[in-house]
Amino acid sequence: MEVFLSAPVCGPVVPPIVPHPGYPSVMTNRRLRGEGGISFDHRGPCRDNVRHRHCPGRWRGEVTLGFTPKGKRSRRRVAGRTKAEVQEKLKALNADLDVGIIPKAGYTVRQAAEDWLKQGLDGRAPKTIKKNENVLGPILTIIGGKKLRELTAAEVQQALTRMATRYSSAAVSMGHNALTRAIRHAEAHDLVGRNVATLVDIPKGQAGRPSRSLTLEQATVLFRVSAEDPPALELPPGLRDHRRPPSLMRAYIVLSLTTGLRTEEIRALRWDHVDLKGDPGTGPPTPPHVFVWRSVRGHGDTKTEKSRRSLELPQVAMEALEDLMEQQADERRAAGAQWHDAGLVFTTATGNALDAANVRKMFRVVCRSAGIGDHWTPRELRHAFVSFMSQQAMATEEIARLVGHSSSRTTEVVYRHELRPVIRSGAEIMNKIFKG
């Protein structure tokens, strides 16, 4: 009898796997929950029911996010010409969902800008909203139809570069800032993963109109002519059919040129914020002064905290305001019941507030009469004030306090203009050092 020795068995004996007749012998890979599905959307007869090669239609992918409050499924869909393209889009979509981004289907750059203008500027003045809408216009013309999720930094750079061929550098910078804030608003609402507008450089646009300053001779002529009757030219709306006495524009020009007030601060100035007598009382004497506490901005406050200031009035400004007060009293009596008592210093013939366009047109009339040209604007009187103070060797920090700037750099770089043809201070000091 033959005996066969077998190898020792280690551990329990595992029975062989026998395929069950009710199940396939090879298990298929089932997609996990949340991965989404891919299917082919036929637009004609199917020619390949396995890979759908040469079949008319598109591949589509879908991811289910859950259910809406109404009980309907919330889905996000993608589409592409090939299955691989749809797989990549689904992968990117799932990556966004993993970090909490829930993009809207077909959400474009234009829609993001419109949402920001409606929701992101809540409480801002209509003028501010309109300005942002205007600077976004040239950019949205180029990339407005682009899906926000697919927007690239190169496309933003291209849009800004094209805008720079027609607009000034300041307009291009404001357009870039508005676009950045619009995308940031979408980013805050989990509609996009990153703000590509922050990755681009702002191109240099066209040269704008530089601000200038009056010379001392031009300011002297302007003072003299503003006290005379201007020629009978067409006046702005609200001032027509009424020949205004010269006191209005003289007071406006003198006050702006001798105190450096902003145009928006002068137009909002009230008589109860003007003290033409002062207080010589027992304590420290208070000279005649003006309280710069308001502006024509939407909230009524000044531009910055440092813009809220009290300034002593020069003698020439006091005299101009006293003449204007008498003129306004005559106009109040002439208007009768039509007078609108708003308490403002600078008004129309019926007491209403002056519009910026009114002031610009009347100012150009005076400039034309003074022979200095009609290309000046009222805000350049403020530039002239800063330049005159600097010419008299006043410290830049003190000038910044007078004009209400938050930083003296703004005073130095933007507002100060060198009026002297030759800077002599260095040579004068050297002559003293090396005299003889």
Image (cartoon, helix red, strand yellow):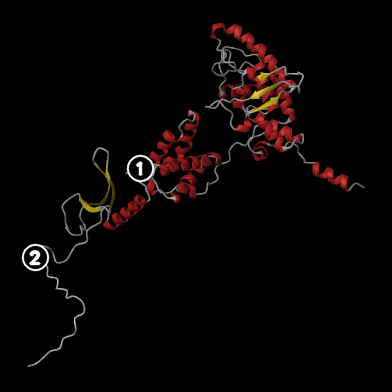
Determine which residue is flagged by label 1. Answer: 107
Q: Is residue 348 left or right of residue 101?
A: right
Residue drawn at point x = 65 percent, y = 12 percent: 327
Q: Amino acid at mark 1?
A: Tyr
Question: 9 above or below 288?
Answer: below
Q: Position of residue 249 (x, y in %)?
A: 65, 19
Q: Residue furthest right?
A: 436
Label 1 or label 2, whichever lies nearer to me, is 2
Residue drawn at point x = 73 percent, y = 23 percent: 314
Q: Position of residue 236 (x, y in %)?
A: 56, 19
Determine which residue is flagged by label 2. Answer: 21
Q: Amino acid at mark 2?
A: Pro
Crowding at label 2, few (<14), some or many (≥20) Cα neighbours within 10 Å? few
Q: Is residue 295 left or right of residue 115?
A: right
Question: 428 above or below 376?
Answer: below
**Can residue 235 be seen in this snapshot?**
yes
- Residues 36 and 206: in front is 36
Q: Which mark is residue 336?
A: none
Residue drawn at point x = 74 percent, y = 37 percent: 395
- Residues 245 and 133: in front is 133
Q: Position of residue 340 (x, y in %)?
A: 55, 12
User: Mark 1 touching mark 2, by CB under 8 A?
Assistant: no
